Image (tube, rainbow, N blue to C red):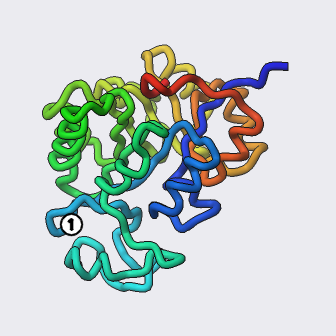
Amino acid sequence: MQKPYLLCIGHRGAMGHAPENTLLSIRKAIAMGAPCMEIDVYFVDGHLLVFHDDRLDRTTDGSGYLCESTFDYLRSLDAGKGQKIPTLEEVCTEIGSSACLNIELKGPETAVPVASLITQLVDKGWDINRFLVSSFHHRELLALRGLNRNIKLGALIKGIPVDDAKFAEDLDAFSVHPSLEFVDQRFVDDAHARGMKVYVYPVDHPEDMLRMQKIGVDGVFTGFPERVLERYSQCDTSMGWC
């Protein structure tokens, strides 16, 4: 019997198995067969760094604010199991053509350098359709849209607005990314009616995966890619996000 469909997006790599947002976590997700990957990016001291929090304390042996630190200091830290905080360039090189990549803009003024890097990679032969740039900072998404209209955008949101997914349609987004805590059937149906994909975060438990699949969600961000892959079929991402 054919398995139902639900796209697997490795959350910060495979953060359920390896330190989040590290090359080790990326490699683990690739080895598991995740067709898509999500990572977080700040622009710090002239570099695009893959990191989730605004502070260093939770995931490294450092302390203080990420954006107030120098690149040399940040690269000296242990991000878990001897891993360094990687650059976005290093992550892209690690992934290559193995998976599609969702880059979440976390810090301020990230749109310009991210758009620039994606453009450089596309000029070298990378497929622009394999990139998806998302953010809770919707002004950053608007800035990126003005820089390159061909880059797919994903609009992140925590709660559900009274007009459902209209805000994401106004951003000309490819996808909308609501939280598991708030997403419901009405929101999914509204987003689909507006022509957008719905990718939900974070979805780590099989019962939540089933619930998302039943309400028609297109994909889920998970720290345990194997839990999605063993239960659900995947689309062909060789041509980009689907």
* Rendering coords of residue 2 (x, y %): 79, 20
Q: Residue at x 26, y 82 (%)?
A: 73
Residue type marked 1: Val
Q: In the picture provided, is 220 more to the left or to the right than 75?
A: right
Above-or-below relation of 235 to 124: above
- Considering only vertical position in the picture, is 104 above or below 44? above
Taking the image as shown, residue 240 lies to the left or right of residue 34, namely: left
Of residues 4 and 142, which is closer to you in this image?
A: 4
Q: Residue at x 69, y 40 (%)?
A: 228
Q: Residue furthest right?
A: 1
Residue 7: which quarter of the image?
top right
In the depicted structure, whether residue 230 falls above or below residue 189: below
Percent of width and height locating residue 183: 58, 37
165 displayed left or right of 66: right
* Mark 1 element type: strand
Front residue of this view, candidates 24 and 174:
24
Disc 1: which residue? 44
Please tell me which residue is depicted at 69% across the width and 27% down the height of the picture.
233
